[in-house]
Image: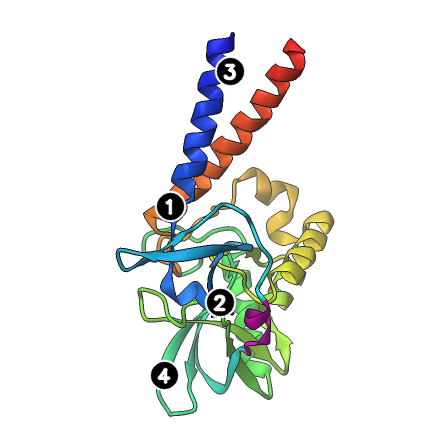
Amino acid sequence: MKKILVSLFIFIISLNVYASSGSIKQSSVIKCDGIYYGSHSDHWHIVKLENNKYVIKDNKELSAPSCYKELKNETEKVKLSKCVDGDTAKFIMEDGSVKTARFLAIDTPESVHPKKEVEAYGKEASEFTCNLLTNAKSLKVEYDKASEKTDKYGRILVWVYADDKLVQETLLEEGYAKVAYLYASYEYTDHLKSVESIAKSKKLRIWSDENVSNNLSSTDTNDNTDTTNDSILDIIIKFIEDFLTNLFKKIVNLIG
């Protein structure tokens, strides 16, 4: 038994050491008072530069540093060019260019994906979003300071406002979307999670018993910034680490 406990302890320590080397995207790194901080999911880490990559210096999870809070998101007035689906649209930008916008931090059921069937409430979500954008007197997009401005497909990643109301929030309120693709500490995700929770409790649309039982897909292979291999490993390591730590505590309590 002692050998098992020692092995578990060593394994947990090794996970901590490995996790501390996880990389952070350069776009998510800021410098405050001479210290580099990297945004990771819903928290921050102190990071350092190694081999032209920013890596986690230690595993301590931090809240947003003061200089990050002082940064402002950029906004831009736009016009609707074309509806696409529930979480995507084409906008005419201030410079006259047309860009495809992927709505940040949410996911709606598929309705136009070339490799997937139409999902439950996909068409309804698409129509709902199109009505919001088409009937709005003013449209605006906002670039989150913690996010990449574009994804690998060239789509801008933005918060979208229709008549000054956040479209992501409206979609969540109505049960047409879920919070998803959180790769950094985005501005409004805490609020959106609470909105999503209410829709879940009401079992609205995608959260209805019938739809949930059909296992609404949680990933979109044609969606925004995919996690890197390091990010995926960080998630797996965190899960294993928490599991083994809890298991270790239980074993110690049983022995004691």
> Within 10 Å of the Cα at label 4, are there few (<14), some (14-19), or many (20+) other Cα atoms?
some
Which numbered tag is attached to residue 98? 4
Residue 19 found in image quarter: top left
Nearer the observer, 168 or 15 = 15
Per the model, the C-alpha gap separating discs 1 and 3 is 25 Å
- Asked whether residue 181 appears in the rendered view, the answer is no
What percent of the width, then of the height, locates residue 36? 45, 63
Residue wearing tag 2: 146
Q: Amino acid at mark 2?
A: Ala
Which numbered tag is attached to residue 21? 1
Nearer the observer, 143 or 80 = 143
Nearest to N terminus: mark 4 or mark 2 = 4
Mark 4 or mark 3, whichever is nearer to me: 3
Mark 3 or mark 2, whichever is nearer to me: 3
What residue is shown at x 59% (from left), y 59% (from top)?
176
Give above or below for 28 relative to 41. Answer: below
- Identity of the residue furthest to the bottom in this view: 95
| First to last magenta residue range | 66-72
Per the model, the C-alpha gap separating discs 3 and 2 is 41 Å
Per the model, the C-alpha gap separating discs 4 and 3 is 60 Å
Per the model, the C-alpha gap separating discs 1 and 4 is 40 Å
